[in-house]
Amino acid sequence: MGAITGTFKGFGVTFSHMFKKVVTTDYPFKPPVSAPRYHGRHILNRHPDGLEKCIGCELCAWACPADAIYVEGGDNTEEQRFSPGERYASVYQINYARCIFCGLCIEACPTRSLTMSNEYELARDNRQDLIFTKEQLLAPLLPGMEQPPHPMRLGDSEKDYYVGALENPGTSAGAEHSPMGPGRYQLDEHPGVTFPGAEQAAQRAGKGDGA
């Protein structure tokens, strides 16, 4: 008797959905808008003068439960300065074939260098393309920023940078809500680097304009 009742319950769910309005999404031409706090592709933020916030501490890599992050720290010098501290990330990679988008790396970051955007279009034809490098993850240069390496502009020590971070946060402000996706993410400051999916996005944009 219980099996028969269960069968009718299952059919009831099926029939109830048959009369509901079908919602069609015009993807990829009109992609759905994700929630403001959606965990998407990572962003490596910058200070207001363009220096990188990442100090190469590798805490994000240690916190990652999927072992998807690889960091190699390097030493800043007065001639070659990429961050306000003693160290910076000379190599930074995230393997999106392994990332589970849990956000633990964000919580582990001591400088709020690493945040997550709303971008979810990360499918690739080649697994190698799922390994994003530092050049692909770095936030674009905003007006007033200078491409590192360059001397510190906001103070004489790293303390001057982090004490005023709340009043002058650089690209960390709202980075988790940033609409950064293929075709919208500018990498002109990194010659020779092509953002994955940018070519496909340009083709889609051309079709949308009637080209």
Image (cartoon, rainbow, N blue to C red):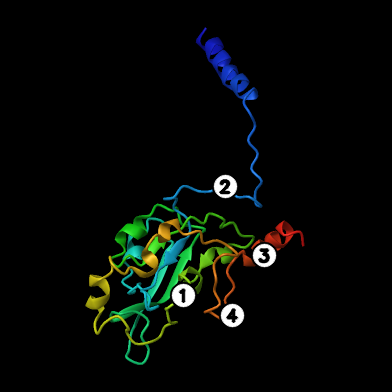
For badge 3, the amino acid type reads Ala
Residue furthest toward the right? 211
Q: CA distance from mark 3 to mark 4?
A: 17 Å
Q: Please identify the quarter of the rendering in which residue 77 is found.
A: bottom left
Which residue is rendered at x = 34% and y = 87% of the image? Answer: 151
Asked which secondary structure carries label 3, the reply is helix
Front residue of this view, candidates 190 and 133: 190
Q: Earlier in the sequence, mark 3 or mark 2?
A: 2
Q: Give the mark, 1 or 4, whose residue is nearer the N terminus.
A: 1
Whether tag 1 and tag 4 are in contact, CB under 8 A, the answer is: no
Residue 32's disc number: 2
Q: How many neighbours does mark 4 have within 10 angstroms: few (below 14), some (14-19), or many (20 or more)? A: few
Task: First in sequence, mark 3 or 4: give its number.
Answer: 4
Give me the C-alpha separation between circle 1 and circle 4: 16 Å
Residue bearing mark 4: 192
Q: Name which of mark 2 and mark 1 comes first in the sequence.
A: 2
Which amino acid, mark 4?
Gly
- Which image quadrant is residue 145 in? bottom left
| Front residue of 121 and 176 | 176
Mark 3 nearby-residue class (10 Å; few <14, some 14–19, many ≥20): some
User: Do residues under tags 1 and 3 come within 8 Å of each other at their CB atoms?
Assistant: no
The residue that label 1 is drawn on is: 141
Mark 2 / mark 4, whichever is N-terminal: 2
Whether residue 104 appears in this view of the structure is yes
Residues at marks 2 and 1 touching, judged by CB atoms closer than 8 Å: no
How many numbered callouts? 4
- Where is residue 69, by image quadrant? bottom left
Label 2 CA crowd tier, 10 Å (few <14, some 14–19, many 20+) = few
Q: Secondary structure at mark 4?
A: loop
